[in-house]
Amino acid sequence: MDESLNGIDRLFGRNPFAKRSRRRKVHSVLAGGLALSLGAIFALGTSMPASADTTGTSTATITVQGGVLSITVPVDAGSLGTLANTVGGGTITGSLGQVQVSDARGAPAGSGWVVSVISSAFTPPAGPALAASAVAYTAGAIAKVGTATFTANNPGNLTGVSPAITATGITGDNSATWNPTITVTVPGGTAAGVYSATITHSVL
């Protein structure tokens, strides 16, 4: 049968091997495509996954500002005491309340500061006042923090600005806290009444 077909092909000038050659080419193309497809699938199946980060870092900042030298005092000391008038007079003594100096300047070794105090006259609603020269200041015990030497000056007359506490030999931050006693000398014959004054502290 094949030979008769071959004979027919030859008769009409056709190449009996052309179909076979085309079949081989088709088979080759199919085989090559299959190989490429399998290779791609194999490559996809065996490729390693991308690595994932398990840690992370962040940068943060803080700001520390320079400190200052400051003082706090009682806003209202209230009554320092009461005295009945006598011919010879007397004194009234009372606690002013807590005074504190805070030095957060980070001062170099050997630095210092001075607390000064001044008082106005003790004035009644009417009549003569008790002069500031009759007002004395006693610091008492001083609680300290940090490295410094604190000296109580204890002025006996608050007419003018007078040193009350002196700090020397400071190294770094420091503070001092005390509760001063105010003594007012009241002469005999002083009129009855409530006398008031303003006592001012400052630190430099």
Image (cartoon, rainbow, N blue to C red):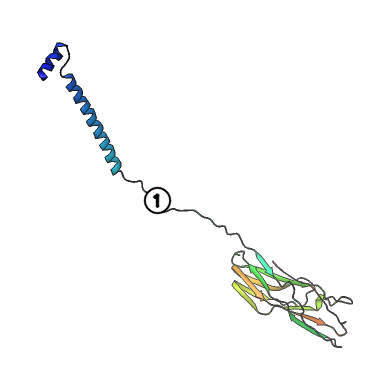
Residue 184 horizontal side relative to residue 17, left or right: right
Give the quadrant of residue 174: bottom right
> Could you tell me which residue is drawn at 65 percent across and 71 percent down?
167
Is residue 33 placed above or below 55 in the rendered structure? above
Where disc 1 sits, the SS reads loop
Residue 109 horizontal side relative to residue 136, left or right: left
Front-most of residues 110 and 103: 103
> Could you tell me which residue is drawn at 60 percent across and 73 percent down?
145
Residue 180 horizontal side relative to residue 169, left or right: right
**Residue 160: horizontal and vertical position, in percent?**
78, 71
Front-most of residues 11 and 83: 11
**Residue 88: horizontal and vertical position, in percent?**
85, 88
Front-most of residues 165 and 92: 92
Is residue 52 placed above or below 38 in the rendered structure? below
> Could you tell me which residue is drawn at 13 percent across and 17 percent down?
5
**Residue 18: horizontal and vertical position, in percent?**
18, 19
Which quarter shows the N terminus? top left
**Residue 55: horizontal and vertical position, in percent?**
41, 54
Is residue 107 placed above or below 78 in the rendered structure? above
Give the quadrant of residue 168: bottom right
Task: Residue at the far front: name it.
Answer: 1
Front-most of residues 116 and 58: 58
Which quarter shows the C terminus? bottom right
As shown in the figure, which amino acid type bears the numbered disc 1?
Asp
Q: Residues within 10 Å of mark 1 (few under 14, many from 20)?
A: few
Q: Which residue is mark 1?
A: 53
> Could you tell me which residue is drawn at 69 percent across and 70 percent down?
72
